[in-house]
Image (tube, rainbow, N blue to C red):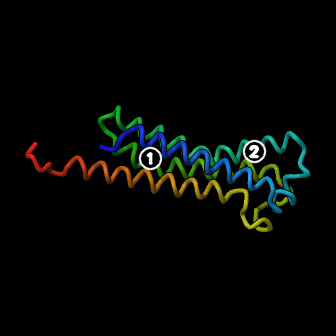
Amino acid sequence: MVDMRRSGKVSGIGLVLVSLTGVAFLRSRAYGLYFDQMSLDNWLIAAAGWCLATYGPILVTLWLWRLTKMRHISWIIHIALLPSLFALLVVGERIMLSTLYSPDFDSTLGAPIMPALLAVLAAATIYYSALMVERRARFQVRPNGK
């Protein structure tokens, strides 16, 4: 079985990588175009949307993985992952867009939402890969007959 400590470590690595991406964005041209001249209130709202869209998938994935270990109908939880990740991405993006003067990210090439999209893709890939590994290990016959 996939060790829970391993999924926690992978989530921790993901949180660090996303944080580093956020710090890099603070020094980018896209940040200077839109976010640098924002009022503090709008900047905090945009940061909250970014955190929701970027950190949310990692935390929700870990929470759902642990939840499946406590429930007998885990397949419902496994199916609920993708809509949950999509909702976090859309809501976080809408919160960020609500603070910008520009109605879309076309002029910034989507830079503010790219880490969130990467987090969603990585979280779903890791989650479902771990699920397949766990299922395969569960149904694999051990060589000593146990």
Q: Identify the image quadrant of residue 40.
A: top right
- Category of crowding for the residue at label 1, using alpha-carbon neighbours closer than 10 angstroms: few (below 14), some (14–19), many (at least 20): few
Q: Residue at x 81, y 49 (%)?
A: 99
Q: Residue at x 71, y 51 (%)?
A: 22
Type of amino acid under label 2: Ala
In this view, 59 is above or below 115:
above
Tell me the residue that label 1 is attached to: 80
> 36 or 76: which is nearer to us?
36
Whichever of callouts 2 and 1 sits on the residue coming sooner in the sequence is 2
- Category of crowding for the residue at label 2, using alpha-carbon neighbours closer than 10 angstroms: few (below 14), some (14–19), many (at least 20): some
Looking at the rendered image, the disc whose residue lies closer to the viewer, 2 or 1, is 2
In the image, taking residue 53 as reference, residue 71 lies left or right, namely left
Tell me the residue that label 2 is attached to: 47
In the image, taking residue 86 as reference, residue 138 lies left or right, namely left
> 38 or 79: which is nearer to us?
38
Q: Residue 85: x percent and y percent?
A: 54, 50
- Location of the C terminus by quadrant is top left
